[in-house]
Image (spheres, grey):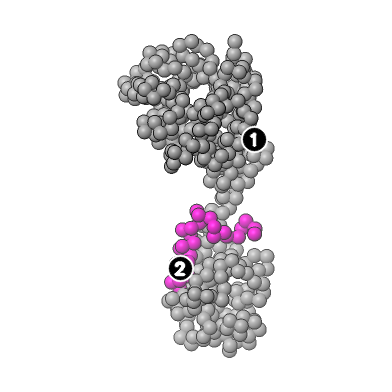
């Protein structure tokens, strides 16, 4: 179906669905009708988008369609039939339509649903199999009021659909053009001053210019998160062959994609002993035992796990303990000004002691000053990265840093 057509399967549209269906039921019950529906006109057909009925087995259902020209809807909109019909059997123009006798149609009220730009989306209609001589202009005025309200709700949903389609197109274009690259930031052994490995970071060259987290969030929102992340991971892994075999490569991955098996698939055939997977503490893990089970065969082959952004987000000591990581990465919010801020120093010291007790190693992120580096060294931090030590660089420039 074309993108403009509404899809009742979108969870983000659920609230609009409920609002429209509630409105249909209210108008149907108020008018004493048997069926009320919202239709959409598209390519010469009438699509029933929302249907409410007093019967358990209504004559129409959401998703059905029929030729527009054979409908009351089209003829009401173009003026061949009036909006208010008390008894369709008394109107020759209504009798021309097979539905009048087939259903049958007795009383019928219908009016156009117009969007803010003047476009006719379709109609809102009510009908009963029996005539109703009590229907009057006040009833039609009420239907017009409901039509205005329903039009606003439908327009909201169309705008959401269009916005979502724009996201799909943006992310798809990034994937098709591979409009992203990998840079590698060195991770140093603080005591020895040598590079132990690199963290792979993604940079997007697509427009609009936005930070990587915005691109990844948008991809996840439209169901392309796994595809984008795996493409990024695959590109980052290509840099591993340019690094000496004693150095490791650290990759950021989503817990959900680990659980789905996508990460394991993209790592097939790779030297897992040289790979660290980083999972951020900003994202909760609903099932730690399943997470551990998925990682177990990878870790048994040497893969290491790191908890990223420790001290900044979702994670707690319990969270880290559940994950049993090989590395704990102190977030920049902890390392920044750690030499002058007692509170940061105390929390970092607690995490460092925690790592020592649980057999993990600490990596400090965001080290930008000599004082921060020296303070972290005194606190017995093993490893660090940051602009003081080395900027993220393309692989060729990163390799040039090595002795």
Give the distance between the C-alpha atoms of the residues marked 2 and 1, in whole angstroms.
45 Å
Residue 2 place in picture, x, y as percent: 65, 58
Q: Characterize the local packing of mark 1: few (<14), some (14-19) or many (20 or more) Cα atoms within 10 angstroms.
A: some
Which residue is pictured at 54% across the width and 86% down the height? 87
Quadrant location, the N terminus: bottom right
From the viewer's perspective, is residue 175 above or below residue 51?
A: above
Q: Mark 2 points at which residue?
A: 23
Q: What secondary structure is the stretch in magenta mostly built from?
A: helix
Q: What stretch is highlighted in magenta?
A: 1-27
Q: What element carries label 1?
A: loop
Does residue 312 appear anywhere in the picture? no
From the viewer's perspective, is residue 400 above or below residue 304?
A: above
Q: Mark 1 points at which residue?
A: 179
Q: Earlier in the sequence, mark 2 or mark 1?
A: 2
Residue 33, disc: none
From the viewer's perspective, is residue 188 above or below residue 64?
A: above
- Marks 2/1 in contact by CB < 8 Å: the verdict is no
Q: Characterize the local packing of mark 2: few (<14), some (14-19) or many (20 or more) Cα atoms within 10 angstroms.
A: some
Residue closer to the observer: 57 or 270:
270
Which residue is pictured at 57% across the width and 36% down the height? 263
Quarter of the rendering containing residue 399: top right
Quadrant location, the C terminus: top right
């Amino acid at each position: 179906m074309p993108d403009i057509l509404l899809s009742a399967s979108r969870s983000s549209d659920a609230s609009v669905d409920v609002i429209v269906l509630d409105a249909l039921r209210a108008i149907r019950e108020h008018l004493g009708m048997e069926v009320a529906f919202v239709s959409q006109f598209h390519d010469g057909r009438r699509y029933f988008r929302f249907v409410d009925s007093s019967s358990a087995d209504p004559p129409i259902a959401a998703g059905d369609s029929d030729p527009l020209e054979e409908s009351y809807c089209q003829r009401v909109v173009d003026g061949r039939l009036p909006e208010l019909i008390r008894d369709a059997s008394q109107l020759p123009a209504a009798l021309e339509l097979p539905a009048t006798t087939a259903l049958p149609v007795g009383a019928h009220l219908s009016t156009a649903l117009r969007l803010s730009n003047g476009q006719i989306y379709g109609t809102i209609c009510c009908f009963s199999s029996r005539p109703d001589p009590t229907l009057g202009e006040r009833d039609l005025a009420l239907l017009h009021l409901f039509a205005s309200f329903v039009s606003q709700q439908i327009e909201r949903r169309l705008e959401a659909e269009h916005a979502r389609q724009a996201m799909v197109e943006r992310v798809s274009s990034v994937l098709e053009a591979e409009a992203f690259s990998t840079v590698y930031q060195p991770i140093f052994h603080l005591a020895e001053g040598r590079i132990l490995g690199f963290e792979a970071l993604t940079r997007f060259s697509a427009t609009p210019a936005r930070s990587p987290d915005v691109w990844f969030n948008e991809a996840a929102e439209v169901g392309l998160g796994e595809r984008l992340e795996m493409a990024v991971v695959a590109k980052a892994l290509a840099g591993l062959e340019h690094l000496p075999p004693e150095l490791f490569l650290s990759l950021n991955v989503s817990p959900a994609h680990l659980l789905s098996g996508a990460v394991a698939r993209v790592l097939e055939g790779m030297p897992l002993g040289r790979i660290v997977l980083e999972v951020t503490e900003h994202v909760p893990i609903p099932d730690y035992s399943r997470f551990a089970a998925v990682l177990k065969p990878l870790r048994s082959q040497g893969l290491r796990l790191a908890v990223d952004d420790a001290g900044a987000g979702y994670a707690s000591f319990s969270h880290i303990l559940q994950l049993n990581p090989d590395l704990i990465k102190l977030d920049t919010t902890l390392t920044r000004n750690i030499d002058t801020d007692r509170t940061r120093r105390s929390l970092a010291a607690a995490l460092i002691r925690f790592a020592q007790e649980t057999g993990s190693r600490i990596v400090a992120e965001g080290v930008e000053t000599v004082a921060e580096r020296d303070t972290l060294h005194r606190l017995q931090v093993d490893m660090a990265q940051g602009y003081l030590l080395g900027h993220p660089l393309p692989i060729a420039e990163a390799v040039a840093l090595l002795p």
